[in-house]
Image (cartoon, grey):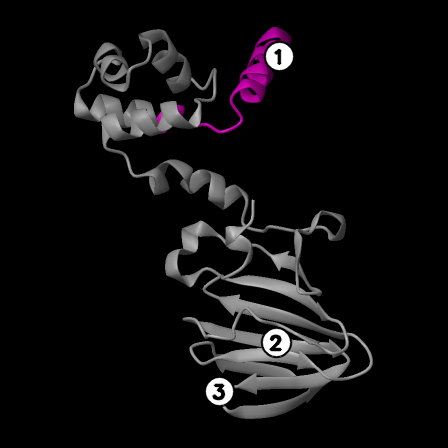
């Protein structure tokens, strides 16, 4: 391959970082559709479909959805390669999302993945000031929760029971019953908490 060809290939990859083209073209040809037919049914130009199939441009999401509908393609099939190339997600300490509820701070450390369906999971660092408590589970919800107390001490109120918790303790329970974490001590209570299915950060922007 010549230097100019290498440069052209590199520019093409930069223009279309996600390569859907080969899959779209193979399905179109297998169904016996022409570029013109697909373009008309998707409401886009024939030239655009051709460029997408050759990975010269990345389609806008509405265009991709329209093409997938015309070709009757499962989106899981289209994004399979992308997921394989991104098996690990890291949330850096300076990029964590956080929310406050009545003085309690929740800092996200594991993000829900919509591909997991009803098995989504989220994990966050909870910081509860003295004489404060959580509220989100006060009526219960589906799923399970696990936690690990990093520092401080307090109580887990679960149904009509009260459990004393302190630094180093691990907690696990069905989330269906009402439950709250209470910090009745004189220092912050900090804990790592994991919830499935996700309840909090899937609602955040």
Q: Residues within 10 Å of mark 1 (few under 14, many from 20)?
A: few
- Residue for badge 3: 159
Along the polypeptide, which appears first: circle 2 or circle 3? 2
User: Label 3 near label 2: C-beta < 8 Å?
Assistant: no
Gap in angstroms between the C-alphas marked 2 and 3: 17 Å
List x then y, in percent, for residue 145: 52, 74
The answer to whether mark 3 and mark 1 are in CB contact below 8 A is no
List x then y, in percent, for residue 45: 33, 9
Q: Earlier in the sequence, mark 2 or mark 1?
A: 1
Quarter in which the C terminus is drawn: top right
Q: Residue at x 64, y 9 (%)?
A: 3
Q: Which residue is mark 1?
A: 7
Element marked by disc 1: helix
Magenta-drawn segment = 1-23
- Gap in Å between the C-alphas at discs 2 and 1? 52 Å
Residue 177, by quadrant, is bottom left
Q: Mark 2 sits on what residue?
A: 147
Q: Position of residue 136 (x, y in %)?
A: 54, 68
Query: Judging from the image, what secondary structure is the residue with disc 3 in?
Result: loop
């Amino acid at each position: 391959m010549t230097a100019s060809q290498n440069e052209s290939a590199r520019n093409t990859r930069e223009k279309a970082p996600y390569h859907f083209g080969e899959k779209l073209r193979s399905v179109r040809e297998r169904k016996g559709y022409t570029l013109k037919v697909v373009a008309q049914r998707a409401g886009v130009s024939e030239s655009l479909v051709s460029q997408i199939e050759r990975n010269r441009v990345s389609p806008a999401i509405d265009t991709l959805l329209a093409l997938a509908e015309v070709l009757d393609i499962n989106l899981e099939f289209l994004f399979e390669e992308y997921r394989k190339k991104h098996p690990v997600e890291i949330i850096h300490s300076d990029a964590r999302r956080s929310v406050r509820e009545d003085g309690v701070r929740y800092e996200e450390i594991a993000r829900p993945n919509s591909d997991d369906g009803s098995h989504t999971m989220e994990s966050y660092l909870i910081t509860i000031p003295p004489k404060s408590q959580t509220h989100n589970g006060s009526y219960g919800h589906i799923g399970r929760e696990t936690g690990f107390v990093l520092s401080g001490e307090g109580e887990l109120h679960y149904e009509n029971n009260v459990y004393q918790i302190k630094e180093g303790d691990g907690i696990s329970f069905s989330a269906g019953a009402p439950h709250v974490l209470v910090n009745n001590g004189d220092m912050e209570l900090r804990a790592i908490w994991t919830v499935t299915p996700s309840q909090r950060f899937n609602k955040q922007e």
